[in-house]
Image (tube, helix red, strand yellow):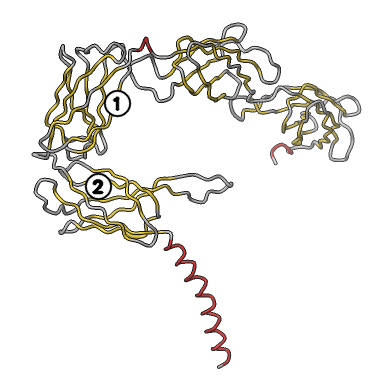
Amino acid sequence: MKTRILMVLLAMALLIPLSTLFAQEDADKGNLSGFVTDLITWDPVEGAKVCVSYDFMPKVRGGKDSVVKREMCDFTDETGVYYIEGIPAGSLQVMVKAAEYYPVIIDVEIFAGETTQADFELNPCVNGATGALKGVVLDGITGEFLDGAKVVVKVLHNSRCDELASGEVRGFFGETDENGEYYIDDIPVGEHKVAAKARGYEVAIEEVVIVLDETTTQNFELIPCDSLDKGRVSGIVTDGETAEPIKDAKVFIKIKDYLQGCGYPLLKTTTREDGSYIFDDVRAGTHRIVSMARGYKKFIGDVTVVADEITEFDIALEKKWSSVKGSVSGIVVDKNDNPVADVDIVIQSKKAPGSIYVKGVAARTDVDGKFIVENVKVGVVKVIAVKRSVGSGYVMAEVFEDETTDVRIVIKKGSMKE
């Protein structure tokens, strides 16, 4: 009887911390529920897929963290209702998709221990709610009207809309007349991105809201490429170990926040004989700079370009494989511990680009079975001793900078096959 009571008390003691743990986990999560209806008829949409996406950090071996995207989804019932529970608290993205409807993407705040209600109205692909967009496109410096400028409204489509792949973007297009005016109709209602572009001008992008049976006005002022603030970037690419200049090294500048219209998003050049490089007409701002050369590790950094100034940016590249060297010396004996003369010594060391071993007779033992090999690259190497009439053997050795590593190799018949 006492044993049974003790077992019950022990079980209760174990359950209490577990229940507390589960309660703490649930306390960090919330729920999401609501209705999905047709924007035109207000009828419930059955079978609509509602998904909440969030970042998840799984446990990874080696102590490195990685972030993956996870989704929690539910389908609406015949009344258009959905319910998703156990969602991590925070501001998360929700996407709603249904056959023959445009998808909807919004941000929703999930509160711990609460159920957030989010209702959605889906716009039908056919005979759906539409509006129009109009405006004027001007030169941002002179204020002159731009004739022939293109205006594009980018709308997110579902896989059932116009037989486009899920998440693909379709454009509604317009073009300005001699007065710089444009007009685009039959645009699905909702919030969309609108881009205006013209040859020789920077592209301008705005977000607009299209309202049912109304015309939204959005004007644009495009900045001429010639008026953008620009500077120059120059420098020297050198060997980080020897400080010697590197010829024919590649240097790239990737323009951040790039919009098509002026120049290219990626500038590239090659270093001269003295390792120097230069970029002209680089847009002012902070951009990513990259340099590469054969046998060296890639360099990645940031360079800040100032208008009408030359920014000096020198780059020191680190070699993939160190050129620092040491020595290997030792003695070769047979199975009876007798020194063996005239044994070929081969050093195998890893070489670019992978783990290919470089072979070659590096030395030969003297009458006392001794040898020395100089100018061996630092790192772990394989030291092999071979004599056809006696046998072979090897040892693994680590070579250090400006030091001599001593080894002892026993050779015998068939030892290299073991």
**Which kind of residue does numbered mark 1 sit on?**
Ile
Instruction: Inspect the image, locate mark 2, and give the three-letter code of the amino acid beneath it.
Output: Val
From the image, tell me which residue sits under label 1: 205
Say whether residue 398 is left or right of residue 3.
right
Q: Residue at x 64, y 23 (%)?
A: 319
Instruction: Give the camera-side residue of 1 and 411.
Output: 1
Above/below status of 13 relative to 225: below
Bin the neighbour count of mark 1 within 10 Å (Cα to Cα): few under 14, some 14-19, many 20 and up: some
Residue contact at pointers 2 and 1, CB within 8 angstroms: no
Q: In the rendered view, does 409 fall on the left or right side of 254? A: right
Q: Secondary structure at mark 1?
A: strand
Tell me the residue at 55%/84% (across/down). Answer: 7
Q: Position of residue 370 (x, y in %)?
A: 87, 28
Q: Residues within 10 Å of mark 2 (few under 14, many from 20)?
A: many
Q: Secondary structure at mark 2?
A: strand
Which residue does the image show at 35% across and 50% down from the upper left? 71
Residue 393 lies, in percent from the top left, at: 76, 35
